[in-house]
Image (cartoon, helix red, strand yellow):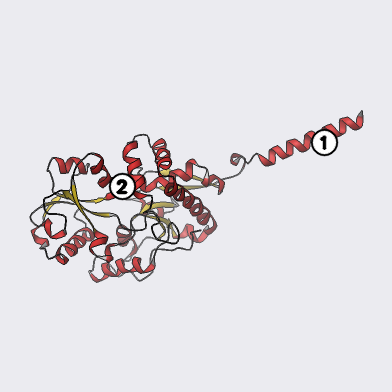
Amino acid sequence: MRKKILIFFMTTVMALSLVACGSGKKEDKDLEKVTFVLDWTPNTNHTGLYVAQAKGYFEEAGIEVEIVQPPEDGAEVLVASGRAQFGVSFQDSMAPALAGEEALPITAVASIIQHNTSGIISRKGEGMHTPKGMEGNRYATWNGPIELATLQQVIESDGGDFEKVKLNPSTVTDEVSALKTKSVDAIWIFYAWAGVKTELEGLETDYFAFADMDPVFDYYTPVVISGNKFLQEKPETAKAFLRALTKGYQFAMEHPEQAAEILCKAAPELDLELVKASQMYLADKYQAEAEQWGYIDATRWNHFYNWLNEKELVEKDIPENTGFSNEYLP
């Protein structure tokens, strides 16, 4: 009897040990905390992030991610200061942060979308299907030096006169309403959101993409950035984070409707129909022809910054291969 009791006791202990070992509960394990700061309110640029969060990919990588909204001075300052480890930025808006005496210690570690999907949208049939057609029309401008230089180059390359474009300070919060009410004639948009929205609302438009006008404008927008100090001190954490994030974007590419639902669950204020349509549009654009999601091509990166240098749009020339790295991608 004692032998039977001992065998029963040992079997029970072993079974409980196996259950404990096999439970895989991440809450029993210390997770490294990182903060990710967005560039704007949640949208389909961020879907892979929310998928990785919801699917437990970060947790599997030993990471706990806090997603926060950007401060007024943007994600770059927060990441550079170390108050956030990762964030969303854009190659064009990063440029001033990488140049001059007060350059910020930040690096783009992944491209969210492989090609620039931004361009100029207008009401259909008003002649603005090409840049030259913007002459005499009202363009909603942020008055950014890089923005205006980009616009000037594509208009003049098309045989137009940039001086004839009416630059109206932008107050646009809804592109569809602005075009419908004719408060403005042309707007710079990212097609994956505002362009798709015009389609859903039945507004016929003309559109030209900057990347189609000149290869120099096929820069990276948006990108994931990180702080240089963090990357130097915790490269393995950065790699683990990007492995999980890559899985999130791969899921979004393969299952766009499910990914859209995950995003809307995390941000219920979003319109599900718009998110699904936007997600379908982006599914084959996150990675496009690149060898993997997140890869940044040095030639295209340098081409754009060399153009900024030539146009004297930065305080100090940005050397080639500055501000990006593929080292942390899986």
Find residue 239 and report its horizontal and vertical position in percent: 51, 56
Q: Which residue is mark 2?
A: 72
Give the residue at x 16% y 66%: 157
Which one is in front, 201 or 34?
201
Amino acid type, callout 2:
Glu
Q: Is residue 277 visible?
A: yes
Q: Is residue 314 visible?
A: no
- Image height of 35 relative to 230, above or below: above
* Quarter of the view holding residue 197: top left
Helix, strand or loop at label 1? It is: helix
Q: Which residue is mark 1?
A: 10
Q: Earlier in the sequence, mark 1 or mark 2?
A: 1
Give the residue at x 63% y 41%: 24
- What whole-number distance in Å separates the C-alpha atoms at marks 1 and 2? 62 Å
Amino acid type, callout 1:
Met
Helix, strand or loop at label 2? It is: loop
